[in-house]
Image (cartoon, coloured by chain):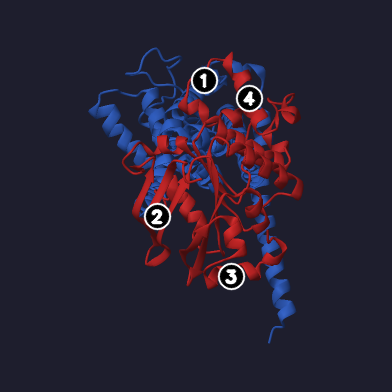
Chain colours: A blue, B red
Amino acid sequence: MISRTLKNQLFITFSRLSGFFVLALLAGVIGVIAVKGMGAISFNFIFSPMQEGGLSGGIIFQIAGTIILITTALVISLPLATGAAIVKSIYWKDTRQAGAYQFFLYVLNGMPSILLGVFGFFFFVKFLGWGKSWLTGGILLAIMILPVAAISIAGGMERIPREYIDNARALGLSTPQIIRSVYLPQSFSSMLSGLFLGLARAVGETAPIMFTATVFAGAVWPDGIIENPVLSLPYHIFNLVQESYDPRAASNAWGSALVLMVFASVFSMLTIIFRLSAHEEARGS
Amino acid sequence: MTNKQTLVELNHISVTAGSHLIVDNVSLKIKEKSVTSLVGPSGAGKSTLLRVINRLTDREDGLRVEGQACYREKCIYTCCQVEDLRQYVGMVFQKPCVFPGSIERNLLFGVRHHKKMNASEIPFFLEKILKQVHLWTEVKDRLKKSASILSMGQKQRLCFARVLAVNPEVMLLDEPTASLDPHSTHEIESLIHELKQEKAIVLVTHDLVQVRRVSDELIFLSAVNGTGRVVESGTPERIFNRPEQEETRHYLSRHRIEEVKL
């Protein structure tokens, strides 16, 4: 019979090994991308347009297109996620609807991104006749971000101390006034952390944008909505990897991957900063 | 006292949470320019009654209020919007709660939603309100600084100031000195004395010495099986010295009433 001490030791050792394995895996992926990608990174690579189908030149329009897509997604998802969180945490607080709404958000969050791409293709590209458009990509990425952001903002709103709400109510503030004066300022950090968490995931997504918003070559700055695709880093990497038997394509794919990883890391770091700030606010109050 | 106008009147108020009766058939009157204290053991529904008066019970799930509650002889549920009622009937809570942000932001937190003020008016308004709660000299040089750095006593006076800024006729005070030191308690009691010159005050407290010091009227509630009822009411002098009901006598004796006998 195994003694309790041995069981404890086995459990602790297994936990430590698991933790170390996850850390090593993450460090390995980041390390390989950083080492392989650094070789391609130069001023010219970052700030010049692609040439020879990506075999030479840079990725300035891929970076610009990615920024356009995620900024559009941010602008669309911020008010929607905030509205969804207000409904769930304030107007439907402690009701069955709130539980159902949360379930719906989890389902949306778990939806494979390719399905969003298919929906976007048939609805925006074909039904509305927009063709490939940066706006469609922004909308689809916003839908991807929405559940994570809404759940994070709702969590921030639910952590606001009851005294704040009671005091504001007792001063004669209506619910919309309390939302503006208490809920929104107090859940600001949660709002940003949720959005950046969503963006960190969305920035690397290829599936929702490959049929709907982005092309491999031939696009620069959008000058309208319809038939106005952009270049993007994820789709650029997707294509270069397919051509990676050519060492120049492989090198540029690693360089683009490193730039994309920097984007995602910045959003992840912002998420952590704002999440810590949200917890500090909750503790401080 | 008898010539004073009644501002708030509760008639046969009962409050239930689910199937549990919290307050049973309570009737009381709150008169202008006076301090009415609600006294009784925990669970007697004192705080619940305060929350009924300014309708903070409205949004509490499963809570049902029956009976008639009037402000200036009009039903509080039909006389006006609930936000307007809370302008007339303000409330200070047990735990001083300052909002994140400056002292100035805290002071203007309620009033800026009810009344438009020119930027030029604000400094005079802040000075007037802060002087009213004797906080002006302590904070006049740091109005833009965070309110969170104030002491508990100062925070509670800031909470009073925030409510006074809205200019209510009735102030509901839910154990406002329960978390304060004796010096801050004394300051709040002095403030209550001054405020009753122009406002009706309803005070919930467990501090019988405080009741003796500040109250004009005392309403004693009992808690039997978690249900609050009014046992008796009258002047503090009469109730402390000649309680008519056995429950009152028993409660007062348990709380060392001999120390506070007049």
Q: Position of residue B184 (x, y in %)?
A: 73, 44
**Residue of label 2:** B61
Q: Secondary structure at mark 3?
A: helix
Q: Is label 2 on the same chain as label 1?
A: no
Q: Nearer the viewer, residue B25 or A271?
A: B25
Who's the residue at 47% across and 41% down the image? B4
**Residue of label 3:** B249
Q: Secondary structure at mark 2?
A: loop
Who's the residue at 51% across and 54% down the image? B47
Q: Position of residue A78 (x, y in %)?
A: 46, 32
Q: Nearer the viewer, mark 3 or mark 4?
A: 3
Q: CA distance from mark 2 to mark 1?
A: 51 Å
Q: Which amino acid is tagged 1?
A: Ala
Q: CA distance from mark 2 to mark 3?
A: 36 Å
Q: Where A200 falls versus B45 (above or below)? A: above
Q: CA distance from mark 3 to mark 1?
A: 81 Å
Q: Nearer the viewer, residue A104 or A201?
A: A104
Chain letter of the residue beneath label 2 in the structure image:
B
Q: Is residue A218 visible?
A: yes
Q: Is label 4 on the same chain as label 1?
A: no
Q: Earlier in the sequence, mark 2 or mark 3?
A: 2
Q: Earlier in the sequence, mark 4 or mark 2?
A: 2
Q: Examine the image and state in which quarter residue B240 appears.
A: bottom right
Chain letter of the residue beneath label 1 in the structure image:
A
Q: Nearer the viewer, mark 4 or mark 2?
A: 4
Contact check, label 2 and label 3, Cβ < 8 Å: no
Q: Is label 3 on the same chain as label 1?
A: no
Q: CA distance from mark 4 to mark 2?
A: 39 Å
Who's the residue at 51% across and 38% down the image? A168
Q: Which amino acid is tagged 4?
A: Lys
Q: Which label belongs to residue B128?
A: 4
